[in-house]
Amino acid sequence: MTIARPDPGPDPGFARPVFRTPSGLFPAGPSTRPTYREPHPVTGGGVAAGGGAAAGWLLLFGLLGTDVVSYAWWTVVAGLLAWSTALVLVRYGDRGVATGVAIVTAGGWSIAAAVVAVRWATAGDWPLW
């Protein structure tokens, strides 16, 4: 009969360092991984500034219209210019301002569409052509 001996493990004279990944609960020194920070983070102030600028822009262009047709077309043109500016801001500038511009421009287009729809419903004729 053979008796199985338990594995004694590594030689006690040979010490190996134990590498453990820290849990992150307690700081264990500087991170070995790089940290990337956004140069222009989206902030509430930036979104509000972009929204205010777009609202003023759409208001100025909307005031150029003398009737529903011209108001709608001026709003479409102003919105296209605003969105092209927002695209440039997303790529090269502040994304928060671009977000505010895009949100308010979409709202302005919705208002213009509602005005056109009400005119179409009351007059029975499509007002834009």
Image: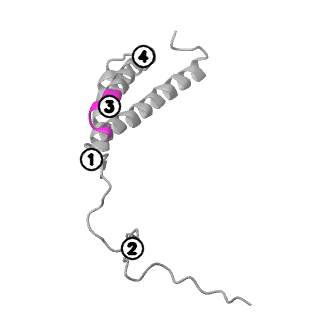
Q: Position of residue 112 (x, y in %)?
A: 46, 26
Quadrant location of the N terminus in the rendered image: bottom right
The image quarter containing residue 64 is top left
Q: Residue furthest right?
A: 1
Residue positioned 51% across, 29% down in the render: 114
Residue positioned 44% across, 19% down in the render: 72
What residue type is disc 2 on?
Val
Residue on which the image places disc 3: 91
On whether residue 91 falls in the magenta region, the answer is yes
Residue positioned 25% across, 43% down in the render: 39
Disc 3 versus disc 2: nearer the observer:
2
Q: Element type at marker 3? A: helix
Residue on which the image places disc 4: 73
* Of callouts 1 and 2, the N-terminal one: 2
* Of callouts 3 and 2, the N-terminal one: 2
What residue type is disc 3 on?
Arg
Residue on which the image places disc 2: 18
The image quarter containing residue 71 is top left
Q: Would residue 73 be found to the left or right of residue 43 on screen?
A: right
Q: Are marks 4 and 2 in contact (CB under 8 Å)?
A: no
On whether residue 122 falls in the magenta region, the answer is no
Q: Residue furthest top?
A: 129
* Of callouts 3 and 4, the N-terminal one: 4
Q: Element type at marker 2? A: loop
What residue type is disc 4 on?
Trp
- The residue carrying pointer 4 sits among few (fewer than 14), some (14 to 19) or many (20 or more) residues within 10 Å by Cα, namely some
Residue on which the image places disc 1: 45
Which residues fall within the magenta stretch? 86-95
Q: Position of residue 30 (x, y in %)?
A: 26, 63
